[in-house]
Every structure is written in structure tokens, then in C-alpha cells.
Amino acid sequence: DGKDDIAERAKQEADIQQRVAHLKKAGLWSLKKLTRVTEPPRPKTHRDYLLEEMQWLAGDFAQERRWKRALAKKLARTVVRFHEEQKQKEERAKKEELSKLRRIAANIAKEVKYFWTNIEKVVQFKQQSLAEEKRKKALDKQLNYIVDQTEKYSDWLSRGLNNSIATSHTGSLSSSPARTEAGPSMYSFEDGDFEPTDESDDEETIAQAEREEAASREARRREIELLRREGELSLEELLHSLPPEMLAEGDVDVDEDTEDDSVKEVYDDEFDAEDEDDEDVEETIEEQEGVEGTASYQQELDELAREGEMPLEDLYKMYA
């Protein structure tokens, strides 16, 4: 039986293959997929309504999920932007505070620089005033010394000249009696003119006067040359050239009121006091100059030399 069924099926398949081949030849058989047979309309059941509702709910859930995701992303971006803005505000506030502190520091630095610039001007002016005053004192001492020496030389010269003239007159008077007895008189009034009888004494007196005059001219020339050379010397060389006894005599008495007035006049010419600090500085300088007026001359020179070798910071600390 089984063999008969297989043979029957094979026969049916062979018939089907023949029919297909026949239809292909006739052009009635197509290799494309056959069109779907439309089902006839049928009434909806409860299952159909349930499936439609489930399909709508699935779409609604998907749409709501997408909306919630977008809303969460937007909220997250808003939070991130808020924190970034807060951080930027903090950084901006720090920068503004730093710039404010820098401006304050710059203003303070300008004020400090202006203050120390004024102090430096005061110190320089004080040093110049002291140097000029000491140079003036040294020149006055040198001038007084030169004047004294000149007066001494003049006295010596006048005394020597007077002694020589007196000696010549004494010699001429002592020799006149012998000449009167031996020869004619000293004066001859026959012609009404003066006729010296002793020509050798007159020539000797004239020669001695000429020598003394030449010596006086030479002394004046040397004095002028010495003054010119001393005028070209610096303050240190001028002080070294002075005799030791002049430096050992002590200070030159200077009226403190006159010195204070002169210093005030120079201060009025050089500086314009703008506030009370400048007046305090001037008062301090005047008091210090009044105290320094009692120091010895050599000590002032030593102090000036030490101040010239000191750095500017130490001078600021000293006169602050």
C-alpha cells in the first residue's frame, strides 16, 4: 500500500509539472508572487477592539517616554548651565576683587613713591645746603687767612721801607757835617735849583726803593696766582691745604637765627609746601641744623663724607 501511495503521488506531481509547463508555454504562468487574496469583510470582535487599544497604548507610552526623556535632558542642561553660571560669577567676583586690590595697592605704591621722592629731594637739598655752607665757611676761613697774611706782609713791607728810609736819612744826616766842613754847602742857591751834593746816597736810596717795589709787585703777583689756584681747588683739597692750626681753632661762629632764615628762604624758593607733612619735615630739618650748628667743623666734614658713602635706603631711615 505504501508503494502504491508513493507511486500515486509521483504521478500527480508529474501531472502538475506538465500542466505548469503547458501554462508557461501559453504565457499564463508567472514567476512573480501571486497577489494576496482579499479576505471578505467581517465584523469586529472583542479581540479586535482589545488589540487596537493595546496598539494605541503602546504608541502613547512610547511618545510619553520620549517626551519625558527630552524634558529630563532639558532639565539636566538647565542645571548644568546654572552651576556653570554660578562658577563664572564666583570667578568674576574673585577677578574684580583682585583687580580692586591691585588698584588700591597701585595707589598706595604711588603715594609711597611720591612721599619718598619728596624725602629724597629734602635729603639732597640738605646735603647740598650743608656742602655749600661748609664750602662757604672754608672759603671764608681761607680768605680771612689770606687777608691776614696780606696785612702782615704789608705791615712788614711798610716797616722795612720806613726803616730803610730812616736809615738812609740818618746816614745822610751823619755825613752832612763833614761834607759841610770839607767842601761847598749841600744846597746851592745861585741858580735857584736843587743840587744834591751826595749823589751816591741818592742812587743807593733809589735802588733800594726800586728793589722793595719790585719785591712788593712780586709778592702781589704770587698772592694773585695763589688765590687763582685755590679758587680752582675742590673742597677736600682746599681743606687739606689749610694750616692745621686753622682747623684746630674750632667752629666759625654763625648766627643760628640768620642760618635758619637763609635755610627757610632757600626752602621757600625750592619747594612749595602742600600739606602739614612738608612743614613738619622743614621743622625737623631746621631743628637738626640748629643742633648740628654746635658740632665741630671736622666732625661735620666726617659726617658729610659718611653720608655720601651711605646707600639711599639708610639715608631714608636716618631722616625719616
Image (cartoon, rainbow, N blue to C red):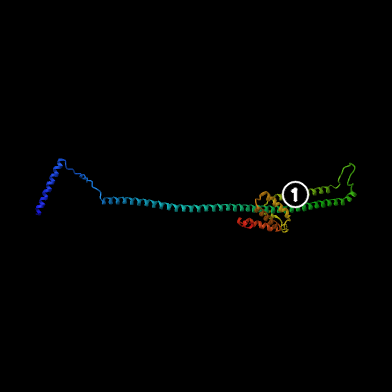
Say left or right for 200 vs 36: right
Say left or right for 182 vs 254: right
- Residue 294: image location, x then y, percent: 71, 58
- Residue 192: image location, x then y, percent: 89, 42
Task: Give the class, few, some or many, for how many residues have Cα within 10 Å of label 1's Cα (few <14, many ≥20).
Answer: some
Say left or right for 205 vs 28: right
The residue sitting at the top extreme is: 26
Q: Is residue 16 above or below residue 254?
A: above
Q: Residue at horizontal 77%, vertical 49%?
A: 216
Q: Amino acid at mark 1?
A: Arg
Quarter of the image that includes the C terminus: bottom right
Q: Residue 282 sits in which quadrant?
A: bottom right
- Report if residue 53 is visible in the image: yes
- Report if residue 230 is visible in the image: no
- Identify which residue, 169 or 229, lies in the foreground: 229
Say left or right for 20 vs 54: left
- Residue 315: image location, x then y, percent: 62, 56
Q: Is residue 41 above or below residue 298?
A: above
Q: Residue at horizontal 71%, vertical 50%?
A: 227
Quarter of the image that includes the N terminus: bottom left
> Badge 1 is on which residue?
220
- Identify which residue, 114 or 215, lies in the foreground: 114
Tally the numbered discs. 1
Describe the element under mark 1 as helix, strand or loop: helix
